[in-house]
Image: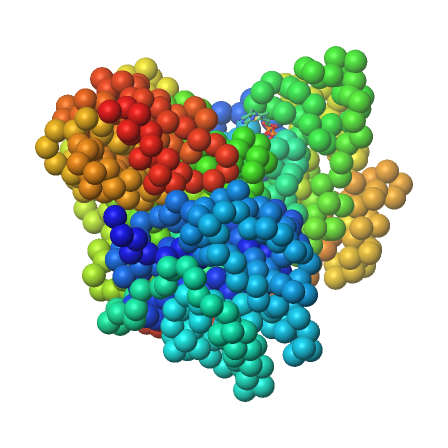
Amino acid sequence: MAKRDLIIRIGGEGGEGVISSGDFIAAACARAGLDVYTFKTFPAEIKGGYAMYQVRASAERVYNQGDTFDVLCVFNGEAFEVNKSQMRPGTAVVYDYPGGDFEPGELPPGVFGYPIPMTQAAKDMKSIRSKNMVALGALSVLFNIHESTLVGALTKKFGKKGKEVLDFNLQGFAKGKELAAKLTKQDPWRLADVQDPKDIIVIAGNDAVGLGAVMGGLEFFSAYPITPATEIAKYVATHLPKRGNHLIQAEDEIASISQVIGASYAGLKSMTATSGPGLALMSEMLGMASMSETPVMVVDVQRGGPSTGLPTKHEQSDLFLAIHGAHGDAPRVVLSVEDVHDCVDMTIEALNLAEEYQCPVILLSDGSLAFSTQTIPAPKPASYTIVNRRRWDGQGTYKRYEFTPDHISPMADPGTPNAMHIATGLEHGETGAPNWRPENHWAMHEKRFNKLNRIVDTYRPTEIDGSGDADVGVITWGSTIGVVREAVQRLRAEGLKVKGFYPKLMWPMPVQQYEAFAATCKKILVPEVNYQGQLAHFIRAETSIKPIRFNICGGLPFTPAMIVAKVKELI
Amino acid sequence: MSTAALHQVEMKPKEYKSEVSVVWCPGCGHHGILNAIYRALSELGIDPTKMMSISGIGCSSRTPYFIKSYKMHTLHGRAGAVATGAQIARPDLVVMVTGGDGDGFSIGGGHMPHMARKNVDMTYVLYDNGIYGLTKGQYSPTSRPELKAYTTPYGGPDTPMDPLLYMLTYGATYVAQAFAGKPKVCADLIKGAIEHRGFSYVNIFSQCTSFNHIDTVEYYRDLVEEVPTGHDVTDLGAAMALARRPNGKAPMGLLYQDKRPTLVDRLQEIVTKVGGHPDYDLNKIIDLSRP
Ligand SMILES: Cc1ncc(C[n+]2csc(CCOP(=O)(O)OP(=O)(O)O)c2C)c(N)n1
């Protein structure tokens, strides 16, 4: 199959402009009307260490970071060494030479090398900070990264800082172009040509969650910093006050979720965002939200665990915690996002569900999506439905936990006449007064659990990728979905019978939909980036399906090639 | 407290009693504190629908059940953090937290500094009985080492803390102390705490007749001594000096009061600075992410 996309990876020392170069290429591709999916890894340290930014761009939809890079641009010897084993025949490598900190020696067989004296050129310009501009100029010439859109992106960024700064950077860019023009192009890689402009934005997963929150009518956010979730708070802190609402930073995650419960009880649509360690701390209070039927929304941007684990690395290992993390029987809703587009839409959806069902809703994202910038259609605020909690209509006698046909009892904001009530973590009767009679505890459990049954039927049906019977059905969740989509397409292009099943509503589980899908597949494969096979565990527990687990946990996402190979093994 | 919430209704103290009957042991100091709260609410004419009474877990944390108001009975140690969120949501309402020394300074000790320094506009009444009452008599952060209790059969290994010194250091803007056996003093200090705009802390010694056999009514009556006339409540140093109990006496009365913008004042300043309002065009925010 002809390759329609281009994957460029930039590697170097953190702080050398790796990230900003990647951002410029991504912005240029987006301006050119291409679909963009970026992938980054950061060192856990503040300064220095190996940083990597990969841009995948295509005239068609891209669903993941790809198998490996076509073009590698390295700013130093470490980045060269780290990536050497992934170079294949045909890979193009642009490297800092002569004058850089290394000599590449002989390149692996079939690899095309393009030495560009980036450091030297920057030194000649008397500013080492223009090194990445030199690299950008060279990449532009060598791989058809459209000069017009790239210069547009540079102008947008540096124009704000004054003409001098802009000119200086453009000079570096021109120098890179000049150096590359002297080389002979040998490899086949070139970026797709400029397409018709599209109404898109380019945004990272964490910012997209923040945007969804602001669009979703969020009224209060309590934050506690943690990698890889902190950017959500930064975005919300910047934009929520524009809507007249507040974000505060709490002393810890227990305080964050406590403040969220307090604000929600007092009438505000409220949320917090964290990663696994924070969600673990919140579990007692999530039980209280479940018991007191208080709407709360928590985003968990998962990272490698347990404990401090791999703070900056990708993993999907908080599903157990999200679904069952609290003592007692504490129902909640758990959703997971596939990509950056979902980060906007499903944040709104999660806020809506919390309000509608008066319970905790946990939205799972993950470390690779957190920082992945992607092109997504510019959201249209008017096209979203915003749900607010059912409020008491003032008729009759108010009972906070009144038994109703759909098990949802209207709330009343403090200050409402004739509706004084208590929100309590103690088991209670309809009025909220403590009540430990056995039949009451039982009836209240049924109320809290049964109110969620309706979600399974009303939530949009789980997407099924493919039709008819299949030899292998792949069930997966979170950002692994994007990887499986491409793998399934490739396998089908080879004539293999493969389908995908992509749940976003993780809990309660749409069991019948899982069963119906599995009935059309000879084998069910469940790839997940965790050690235990957490979704596979729930499938085993809740359905009659006997899934085949496929787990990796090296801090990186799957690639489509890994899924393709595994499926072929099974057929 | 925003003055708009004051003098809304005319209700007698007993009219603030809810329909739930009080569950504390006879002779427990908590009864006196509850009565003082009723009295303060009555004297201030607080409309019960305009009040949020919030607690954690403990005997003292049962208080909201007994008061007519909107209320939350939350988790052990978390009342203050919950109340912070509730107060930001409804700065127009009276927010009161009630709880024990274990709830506030042991499990909830991490939250205390932050409510105080943020100057969350609420009243925190701490029922200080030097013991864990609800769990039947373990030693607490304010227990004296002499106390032979459930888990300290030979006496306690820890040095007790003084809540007042902490709250003064943390930046509370109203700090007072009383003894449950002096209901009028308690009511006046709670009243002042509610009227105060900012974070008010009232520490009230409360005898636990069931489990703390050394901090008796007699002990507390001897321990407390009224804040000397002429004490300058704006002088933090003088307040600290009193809290350190010169001549062994615990000060009773208002030790410290300061005017400082509240958390909501500060948050509102940010909204004003960015020109925030509920109809702010979302497209302007979305457009910032165009390439
Ligand atoms: C997380 C958690 N740990 C422990 C408990 C048990 N517990 C309930 S009340 C309490 C201490 C109560 O003492 P205090 O707060 O001083 O209030 P008092 O009962 O003396 O008024 C404890 C340890 C709990 N409810 N939750």
Q: Residue A294: give x, y in percent of width and height.
A: 36, 40
Question: In this orientation, which residue lies closer to the viewer: B191 or A483?
Answer: A483
Q: Can you name the residue that lies furthest to the top here?
A: B153
> With B247 as the anchor, is A205 left or right in this view?
left
Residue lying farthest to the bottom in this orientation: A163
Residue A558 visible? The answer is yes
Horizontal and vertical percent position of residue A231: 49, 55
Q: Foreground residue, A570 or A31? A: A570
State left or right for residue B11 relative to residue B173: left
Residue found at the far left of this picture? A468
Task: Report the front residue among A437 and A182.
Answer: A182
Q: Residue at x 52, y 58 (%)?
A: A113
Residue at position x 72%, y 55% from top? B256
Q: Quadrant of residue B278?
A: bottom left
Residue pictured at 39% horizontal, 78% vertical: A148
Depth check: B247 or A103 in front?
A103
Residue A83 visible, this orientation: no
| Scheme of colours in the image | rainbow
Residue B234 percent location from the top left of the image: 74, 62
Q: Where is residue A445 shown, x and y percent of the image? A: 30, 24
Q: Quadrant of the C terminus of chain A?
A: top left
If the picture is divided into quarters, which one holds ligand 1? Answer: top right
> At 58% across and 46% down in the image, what residue appears?
A82
